[in-house]
Image (tube, rainbow, N blue to C red):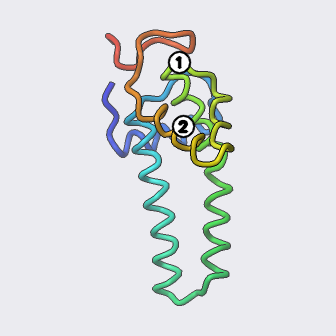
Amino acid sequence: MNVDFVTAVKMFFFNYANFNGRSTRAEYWWAYLFIFIVNFGIGFLCGLLNLGETASGIFTGIWSLAILVPSLAISWRRLHDVDKAGGWFFINLIPIIGNIYYLFLTVQPSGPDNRFGPDPYGEE
């Protein structure tokens, strides 16, 4: 199943707190591109409207709280896709090396059927 940008964003919010199953590499990275674009847009609009750093921080904070759970959920499912338990997300708490290993895991292609579900690119 190939996932485009719009579909990935819909899936990101539809699976708001779904920590089960798998997320493809495309779904994960399209969702994070959307998050980046919104963060950039908030900063740009606050700067354009000359709202200051406080307003920018408030809007960014609200947005960050709104996407906290779905961001964790999609990360969890992405790790499931490469046959790792979702708890591997906390490898990010190890500075530099943990972040690099987590990035390595998220760029891996989807694996075959595993304990977390069928291959998302398998026959439909």
Amino acid type at circle 1 is Asp
Above or below 87: residue 61: below
Amino acid type at circle 2 is Tyr
Residue under label 1, please give it: 83
Which residue is painted at 50% across and 84% down in the image?
47
Q: Residues within 10 Å of mark 1 (few under 14, many from 20)?
A: some
In percent of width and height, residue 123 lies at 32, 10
How far apart, in angstroms, are the residues tagged by discs 2 and 1? Answer: 13 Å
Taking 112 as reference, is 39 left or right?
Answer: right
Q: Quadrant of the N terminus?
A: top left
Furthest toward the bottom, the residue is 50
Q: Dividing the picture into quarters, in which one does residue 87 lie?
A: top right
Residue 74 vs residue 108, the one in the foreground: 108
Above or below 59: residue 69: above
In percent of width and height, residue 14 lies at 54, 38
Q: Quadrant of the C terminus?
A: top left
Which residue is painted at 56% across and 44% down in the image?
99
Above or below 96: residue 53: below
Which residue is painted at 49% across and 23% down in the image?
81
Of badges 2 and 1, the one in the foreground is 2
In percent of width and height, residue 66 lies at 65, 54
Residue under label 2, please give it: 102
Q: Dividing the picture into quarters, in which one does residue 3 lie?
A: top left
Furthest toward the front, the residue is 97
Q: Secondary structure at mark 1?
A: loop
Which residue is painted at 66% across and 43% down in the image?
94
In percent of width and height, residue 103 lies at 49, 40
Q: Residues within 10 Å of mark 2 (few under 14, many from 20)?
A: some
